[in-house]
Amino acid sequence: MADETELETRRKRLLYRSVYRGNKENDILLGQFARAHIAEFTAAELDQYESLLGAGDNDIYDWVSGQAPVPAEADTPVLRKLLAFRVRF
C-alpha cells in the first residue's frame, strides 16, 4: 500500500513538472503525454520519465521535432513512446 501511495505521489509530481515547464510547446506536449501515459507507468518507467524531464526544454523539443538526434543516454522506451505520441488540439 505504501509503495502504491508513493508511486501515486510521484506520478502527480511528474505530471505537474510536465505541465509547467516554462516552454509553452513542451508544456502542451509533455502535459498531454503525461496525462495519457503516466498512470500506467511502472516505477522503472517513472525513473526514465523523471530523467527525461531533467533534460533541457530545447533538447527535448529538438529530439521530438527531429532537429537533433537523441543521445544514447536519453534513448529509453519512455522517450521512444514520447516520440511516437501525437498532440491533440
Image (cartoon, grey):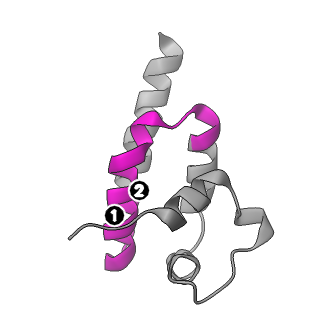
As displayed, is residue 79 above or below residue 46?
Answer: below
Name the kind of residue labelled 1 in the image: Tyr
Q: Is residue 10 left or right of residue 86?
A: right
Which picture quadrant has residue 60?
A: bottom right
Q: CA distance from mark 1 to mark 2?
A: 5 Å
Q: Give the x, y percent position of residue 1.
A: 47, 9
Q: How many labels sit on residues?
A: 2
Q: Secondary structure at mark 1?
A: loop
As drawn, the residue found furthest toward the top would be 1
Name the kind of residue labelled 2 in the image: Arg
Question: What secondary structure is the stretch in magenta mostly built from?
Answer: helix
Q: Give the x, y percent position of residue 88.
A: 25, 66
Which picture quadrant has residue 32?
A: bottom left
Which residue is drawn at the image coordinates 75% and 73% (left, top)? 71
Q: Are marks 1 and 2 in contact (CB under 8 Å)?
A: yes
41 within the magenta span: yes
Which residue is drawn at the image coordinates 44% and 48% (left, top)? 14
Q: Nearer the viewer, residue 57 or 65?
A: 65
Q: Give the x, y percent position of residue 86.
A: 38, 67
Q: Give the x, y percent position of residue 5.
A: 43, 20
Q: Is residue 23 at least partly visible in the picture?
A: no
Residue 20 shows which numbered tag? 1
Residue 17 shows which numbered tag? 2
Residue 87 shows which numbered tag? none
Quarter of the image where the C terminus is located: bottom left
Q: Is residue 2 left or right of residue 70?
A: left
Q: Is residue 64 at least partly visible in the picture?
A: yes
As drawn, the residue found furthest toward the left would be 89
Residue interval drawn in magenta:
17-45
The crowd level at tag 2 (other Cα within 10 Å; few <14, some 14-19, many 20+) is some
